[in-house]
Image: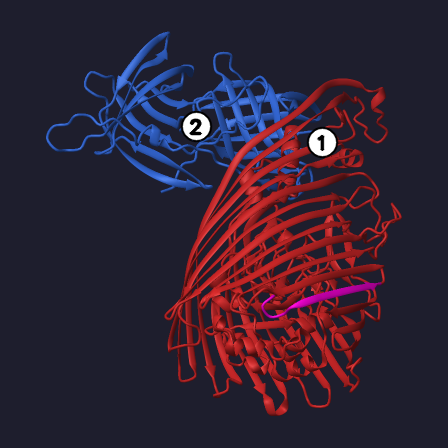
Chain colours: A blue, B red
Amino acid sequence: MKKIYGFMAAAVLAAGLTGCGTGDDPVSLSNVSRTMLNHIAPINGVDDVVVSKGEYYMQFDNVKKLVSVSSKSIRYDNTDHSFSTTSMTFKAGAYNVGGYIGQVFRWQSAEGNVAATGSVPVTGFKGLMTDVFYFNNMLDVPVLGPMLDTRLSRTVLSYNYNNLYKITTFYPDMMFSGETSTTASATAEPFKTSAPQYRVVIDWEKKKASMVIYQAQFDPHMPAMTALLLQNLDVEWTRSGYTITGENVTAGSVENGSVTPVPGFPFTEIKMTTTSADMTEATVEYTVAGRFHGLFKGSYVWIPQD
Amino acid sequence: MRIVGKMFLTTTLLSAFLNGGATGFSLPTEGVAACAGDSGIFSGVAKHDEARSDSVSAEQGRGEVTLGELNVTAIKQEDRLRGEALAATVIGRVELERLDAVTIKGISDVVPNFYIPDYGSRITSSIYVRGIGARMDQPAVGLTVDNVPVLNKDAYDFDVADIASVEMLRGPQSTLYGRNTMGGLISVSTLSPMRYQGWRLMAGGGNGPSFSASAGWYHKFSRRFGMAVTANGNYGAGFFRNLHTGEKTDRERSLGGRVKAEWHPRAGLSLQNVLSTSVLRQGGYPYEYIPTGEVNYNDTCFYRRFTLSDGLTLRKVHSRFSATSITSVQYIDDNMTLDQDFLPESYFTLTQKKRETGFTEDLLFRSPQGEGIYRWLAGLFGFYKHTSMEAPVTFQDAGISTLIESHRNHGNPYFPIHWDSRTFPLNSEFTLSTYGLALYHQSEVEVSGWKLTAGIRLDYERSAMDYHSFCDTGYTIYENPSGDLSQVDFSSLTPYRNVHIDIDDRGKLHRDYWVVMPKLGIVRTWDSEGNLNTYLNISRGYKTGGFNTQMFSDVLQQRLMNLMGIGSKYDVDDIVGYKPESSWNYEIGAHTEFPDLSLGADAALFYIDCRDQQLTMFPDGQTTGRIMTNAGRTRSFGGEITLRWNPAGGFSANASYGYTNARFVRFYDGINDYAGKRLPYAPSNTLFLQGLYTFEFASQSVRSLELDLNLRGTGDIMWNESNTLRQPMYFLLGAGITLSGKDWSLMLWGKNLTSTRYHTFYFMSMGNEFVQLGKPLTAGVTLRWNL
């Protein structure tokens, strides 16, 4: 049974600061800062995509259900750029997913420029802050270590900046969960399972990545492997996201804090591709041992459909 | 339970079967009186003992069951169970002796739809009533012994000397008796020193060989104070031989003792204290491997147990109400050690050692019994149970290579592993604390032959577990360039790395529940003497949730495999924790007596809807790693009939038959869907037929000769959820010849006289199938002597 782990956002958002307001109107403001990676894609479609680290500040007005966002570290061309927005209306809800209750905040800007006075134009702003994301720190994976910041909610922002760039945030360490379909041959019935999860750790500066496939199982009669580690994969930034590829990769089985090669299951080829505009969804295609063809579709955060 | 030290008397039989009990067999009054040297002891007490004036049935003189005001069912219900909206069977002392019922398992055959298979050891008391049963952890049927509610079903099966009667109430009794009485309640009462005085001695022996003996001293120091001290012992050499050791595997020896004191300091006030203890040493587990038909395993199997309990019942009767307090403390210390694979190879062994202390308090107030149109009852119940348990599973050579190494090496043959030692333990220690509180109430209105009873119970329970799992072992990974495991010789391979496994997990889990248990009963009495009544009963039953510690071996195995790079993720709470199970019982029935025909009959039809059934299943898509779950829903319907016929001339006959159709409505275990399949382990039919003939003599030395011929039928029984294996219905013929004098009796008895071969249990372990045979022909002699 796939587990979704999450923590209440109460510590972050519900227990907000109560500011001093005028009159008798209640005031509840929460200030949140988050550091993510920025995927900065030039709108002209010609210049290279740039990825850099960026820090965002968000102020939530929990009474009026408004949020404003700013940043001073939109880094490209070796320069830090900044912006700030006016208030946008957010929608919040608590969701019970697999027995875990998490809060999800979503907002989207109205048509037009939502930049605050003095800021460069910002349009098409979409924001998501969610407690319901996937992670696994039950296993000690050598080299990679545990997933960090798992006590903090995940934030996904996407917007058009200064009419020049489409910026989307993502994380250097993400766990994707969804469904894996594996076929042993062209005519065989696919083996479908939602148990496997895919952790991706991206060294964005070196453009290299590692992937851990938890509960890897290519055949219903094969025992699931707790964690398969694939290292030294290549990262490419694309206009819409990124790809992670590898060829003839010998996976390692994580055993009690160390890695044992599994030559019996070589990954002839593996390719991960982001598939959604906000880069939360991705596919992973691979061929193992020359006979198992796997296709995974999933996401690293859970997004409600309402 | 061994019934020892009782007199068997002719007149008791006649009165018992002429007058009948609830739906079975009554306690003979004149016989007990004669035995005690005091004619009409029961009737005398009934009519003249002021301490019992408000509680004894006016039908005492007819041989109705009189269990005394200090019996819990008499306290909570009417004296006359046959006037209640329920199906109940009472088996008196004489019938218990006649059947030479060794344990409660033997008594169950007599009660319709009530089945306790005899397998494994005395730790196993899987009781099935109308298809409702418990194969793991919590019991579905409650047991009280001299008012002490036995909290742990591991202590259900024990010998008790001088039983006065056993009552079996079928259907949910949860409203009045609370947790774990979803299938019913068994109430055992021992002989009272206020009703019998003197010595009761018993000695017996049978094939096997087996020997038993008991001695009871009953003394009334005054009209108001009496004490009884009893002791009993039992030795059985067993019937099934373990081929590997050449010894009988099911041998046992036990000792038990009891001190029972009753005091009536003044009118309306009575106290009863029962202190009892038992010690048991048993081999047990004569499991036969199906492919070979042999009981053949190499590692030690045994069960040893020590129990100690004390129950204090205080009752104060006022003019307008009575107040009763039942307090108990109980302790059990046992050790179950098994060759878990039950094969001559060394796979793995299991030990489960526990010490458990429990306290219960039941405070009850009620209006005078049998008086007025409206009667009420209200009570408060609380309990606390604390358990410390150690349950190591020791993997041995064959287990390591087959269950661990080959599993792991199949996934990575180029880097196979070999364990550093050929045996290692997976240790588990637990501390479980459970407590609960309940409030209950029942109102009853009786007018013009109609009786309406409504009751409700609000129950809260909290269960907490601290666990500690630890294991210190290791293995070495080797390089095997060929990837060929068929001829691998580890001494020739290059070590790649040594892996040290050091598991030291601690955790706390807890669960709590609120449960409401209502009941409704309607009784219509059609005649003034109460010879015919019909009833309707709707009630809710409840089996508590908690933690199944026996699943912890699954937790540790998953943990170990996870560390080794194979296996699924797990969650401890998911694997071992489970919620309560509940049921709704709908029943109609009738209790009838036809004095002119010397015939009594009781019948019932029932339908049971059981929700959130506690089962084990595999997580989605997995083929290993069971978890506890409340995934099931079952339904059960059927009927029961009991007949008693006592025509003149020394002949009498008894018969009981029960039919149950119990099936899964919903049960998907993660791999298979069993909806529509019959529930395993619960028989669809139970049958008991008995004919008795008594010759009376004028001689003073030998007064009577009784002949008893009986037949028990059980089955068919499904052994698995898929219903692909079953035990067809089987019949066991029994007989007895009893010669009796004034103070003595000599009984020759035989069971399974045709040596019917049948199985009492089936299970699978590591994909291997095992069964346990039922006991073969057994016969013996029992001498009883009262001084």
Residues A300 and B132: in front is B132
Residue B117 lies in quadrant: bottom right
Residue B256 x/y as whole percent: 69, 55
Give the residue pinned by disc 1: B411
In the rendered structure, the residue with mark 2 lies on which chain? Answer: A
> Residue placed farthest to the top in the image?
A78
Residue A171 x/y as whole percent: 44, 22
Residue A29 x/y as whole percent: 24, 27
Q: Which residues are magenta?
A: B193-206
Distance CA(mark 1)–CA(mark 2): 34 Å
Q: Is residue A206 left or right of residue B93?
A: left
Specify the quadrant that holds the C terminus of chain B: bottom right
Specify the quadrant that holds the N terminus of chain B: bottom right
Three-letter code for the amino acid on which mark 1 is drawn: Gly
Give the residue pinned by disc 2: A279
For residue B116, above or below residue B556: below
Q: Is residue B371 visible?
A: yes
Q: Which numbered mark, 1 or 2, is in the foreground of this view?
A: 1
Total label count?
A: 2
Q: Residues within 10 Å of mark 1 (few under 14, many from 20)?
A: many
> Residue placed farthest to the bottom in the image?
B596
- What element does badge 1 sit on? helix
Residue A295 lies in quadrant: top right
